[in-house]
Amino acid sequence: MAGSSSHQIRNICVFGGSSPRKENEFLESTNHLGRVLAERKIHLVYGGGSLGLMGGVSIAAFLGGSQVLGVVPKALTKEDLLGKTIREELQVSTMSERLNTMFKHADAFIALPGGLGILEEIFHISSWAQLHIHHKSIGLLNVNCFYDKLLSFLDQAVEQEFLTSSARQIIISAATAEKFIDQLQSFIPIIDPSMSRIHWSTEESRRKLRLDLSIRL
């Protein structure tokens, strides 16, 4: 939910498809996002490489003056599956370590159009927000209405009571980069009363959370 107050975003993690075969509108919007990040002095964290939308946003951000960090699993560097990472590259052992590393370095998250990997990443980060592990803003850059059906699915999940309205509002969306960054910066999380009792500071609370979830399931 957008509010009147805002928080400063210094680093944004961008998830995006790495396939080189993309419509021009997707590439143009991605390049524009990279330029907007640079204009607003926001640095980029991404999955590394120079291909597809991930490569486009990293090149545009770097050329505009942003610092760029690519986080790449070592297995994907051996066959050069992603292309050459723009600027700084941090190699990790697993996909889980990759996501955790990007999470630690980012103040907010953006999903560009993509496939299964993008959906996994954005929903993983969103589920953490639902569980109050973090309160960082998350959104979909809905280029050419790419995410319309996914957003409708989330609305349907609320209607059928598989998702709370507060959880639904974790994921925001916009079609243009400027409006999108404004929304991310003004995002104010809605605290779900059923989740507010969860605390992640001790191992005891983690055990209690696992117990509570197993009972509900």
Image (cartoon, rainbow, N blue to C red):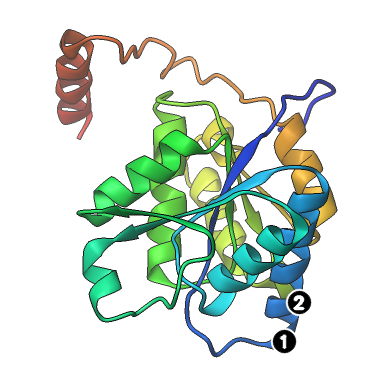
Figure quadrant of residue 182: top right
119 lies above or below 179? below
Residue ID at (43%, 78%): 83
Badge 2 is on which residue? 28
Residue ID at (78%, 66%): 32
Name the foreground residue: 135 vs 7.
7
- Whether label 2 touches label 1, CB < 8 Å: yes
Name the foreground residue: 133 vs 20.
20
Give, as a three-letter code, the residue at label 1.
Asn
Q: Residues within 10 Å of mark 2 (few under 14, many from 20)?
A: some
Q: Secondary structure at mark 2?
A: helix
Figure quadrant of residue 125: top left
Give, as a three-letter code, the residue at label 2.
Glu
* The N terminus, quarter of image: top right
- For residue 24, the mark is 1
195 lies above or below 78? above
Q: Is residue 27 left or right of residue 162?
A: right
Residue ID at (69%, 59%): 61
